[in-house]
Amino acid sequence: MLRIEAEPGAIAIAPERTALLIIDMQRDFLEPGGFGASLGNDVSRLAAAVPPCRAVLAAARRAGLPVLHTREGHRPDLADAPPAKVARGAPGMRIGDPGPMGRILIRGEPGHAIIPELAPLPAEPVIDKPGKGAFFGTDLDLLLRNRGIDTLLVAGVTTEVCVHTTVREANDRGYRCVVLADCCASYFPEFHAAALAMVKAQGGERGGIFGWVSASAPLLAALD
Ligand code: TIU
């Protein structure tokens, strides 16, 4: 067992039952001209999460932890995109509209790709998800259960949207979640802070209401 310093208290993890889950580190959210920018966001705010994510990804690979990546996006014909979600963007910048990185938030387009710094290895599953949560409409739960995973180290963007939704879904399915604070980011620093506070609130020795929050450094120290 590895002991990770975290809040509201340290957590012991069994490496053979723990996976790293990296949420939506896609060009569409981190680079100008994609879905994140189309919603009016300053995408440069997400850049700080990339180096810690890289370090954790490298350490997880060295330690032999399963790594899974997710991508938010839709079929080219938008059959899996709820009309209410498509209608949300500004006209001409909606899901499926052409942008500088191809059609916005559409599978197979350049903007849908995971950023090169965090590119998945061939053996690492990539979960394509139509929603904010990584369990909704995907086979993520099946993949995790088949590998005997009961604990998730969660990184990615954005903290209060897809990371938090996924952590909530994971809780209801019985997984323990450790959110890696500096490996997550939001377009809104105050939402990032609040989302992390929510995870670790109402807790004690055995975690907060949604799990644990740790920085990458204690995890790296435990893994290396
Ligand atoms: N808008 C926003 O903050 N996030 C998303 O739409 N998706 C994810 O968080 N991946």
Image (cartoon, rainbow, N blue to C red):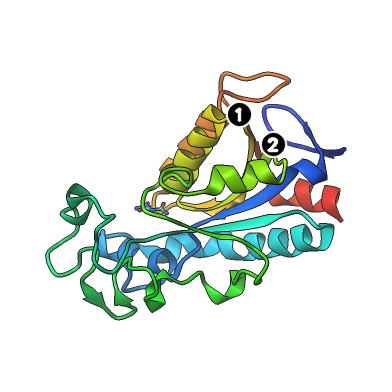
Can residue 214 be seen?
Answer: no
Residue toward you, 16 or 29? 16
Residue 211, quarter of the rendered image:
top right
Q: Report how many numbered discs are placed on residues in the image.
A: 2
Query: Which amino acid, by three-letter code, is at mark 1?
Result: Gly
Q: CA distance from mark 2 to mark 1?
A: 7 Å
Can residue 208 be seen?
Answer: yes
At mark 2, the secondary structure is loop
| Residue occupying the point 36% across, 53% down | 130
Query: Which amino acid, by three-letter code, is at mark 2?
Result: Asp
Quadrant of the rendering where the N terminus is positioned: top right
Query: Residue 123: horizontal and vertical position, in percent?
Result: 68, 67
Residue toward you, 190 or 164? 164
**Residue with the mark numbered 1:** 174
Residue toward you, 167 or 33? 167
Report whether 203 appears left or right of 112: right
At mark 1, the secondary structure is loop
Quadrant of the rendering where the C terminus is positioned: bottom right
Tag 2: Cα neighbours inside 10 Å, few (<14), some, or many (≥20)? Answer: some
Q: Is 179 placed above or below 111 here?
A: above
Query: Residue 115: horizontal and vertical position, in percent?
Result: 52, 72
- Circles 2, 1 touching at the beta carbon (< 8 Å): yes
**Residue with the mark numbered 2:** 150
Residue toward you, 151 or 158? 151
Query: Residue 103: horizontal and vertical position, in percent?
Result: 28, 74
Dot label at residue 116: none
